Amino acid sequence: MLLLIGLGNPGPKYEKNRHNIGFMAVDEIVHRHGFGAYRARFQSLVAEGKLAGEKVLVIKPTTFMNESGRAVGEAMRFYKLAPSDVLVIHDELDLVPGKIRLRKGGGLAGHNGLRSINAHIGPDFQRMRVGIGHPGEKSRVHGHVLSDFSKAETPLIETLIDAISESADLLAPDGPSDGHSQFMTKVALRLAPPKPKSPKSTSTES
């Protein structure tokens, strides 16, 4: 079983914020893969479904970002799961928009949602870092993450979220051994498809 956690802040005020890209990604997965309706559980909104035939619980904590770990810890303990059964999708300042990274463990990079989860379940959970870009100055970070994507960024972000959802079956733990590698490749190809080869010119002798 996989706990697929999308990080964000609850409520319409924050719905389109860069900080909420985790919510956006899991919402699209729930929609595309026919998960059940969200219901209130574990201090979260929870939707149940399957990826690659394996049971998956999508969780959107309703505790606000800084307390996300309370919801994740409660769900993990209820199902008697290990941190490695948890995959958190979150925004990442140090990646440009359109870039993602998948890994187990790692640093917290000043992310309050990750810090809270780390405090409740330890560092050994999986993370999908989704780039939102850095505003350039530390003093502008707070306003940057709590503002919406620009009109110029939106088409790329929409394509990225669609690509994540389309390839989500490869995130299931019982999928192929190189599932995460395949996932990254498929997402990259959606964002930067190979250029079609130009047809070879043929010359006709007269």
Image: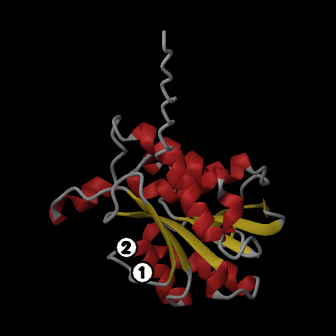
Residue 150 to residue 94: above or below: above
The quarter of the picture where residue 36 lies is bottom right
Residue positioned most to the top = 206
Residue name at image x 31 percent, y 56 percent:
133
Q: Find residue 157 and report its horizontal and vertical position in percent.
A: 45, 45
In this rendered view, identify the residue nearer to me: 194 or 203.
Answer: 203
Q: Secondary structure at mark 1?
A: helix
Q: Is residue 154 above or below residue 46?
A: above
Asked whether the residues under the numbered discs 1 and 2 touch, taking CB atoms below 8 Å apart as contact, a structural biologist would say: yes
Q: Nearer the viewer, residue 125 or 38?
A: 125
Q: Position of residue 26 (x, y in %)?
A: 61, 56
**Which amino acid, by three-letter code, is at mark 2?**
His
Badge 1: few (under 14), some or many (20 or more) residues near its Cα, within 10 Å? many
Q: Is residue 166 visible?
A: yes
Say which residue label 1 marks: 115
Crowd class of label 2 (few under 14; some 14 to 19; many from 20; radius 10 Å): some
Amino acid of disc 1: Arg
The dot on residue 111 is 2
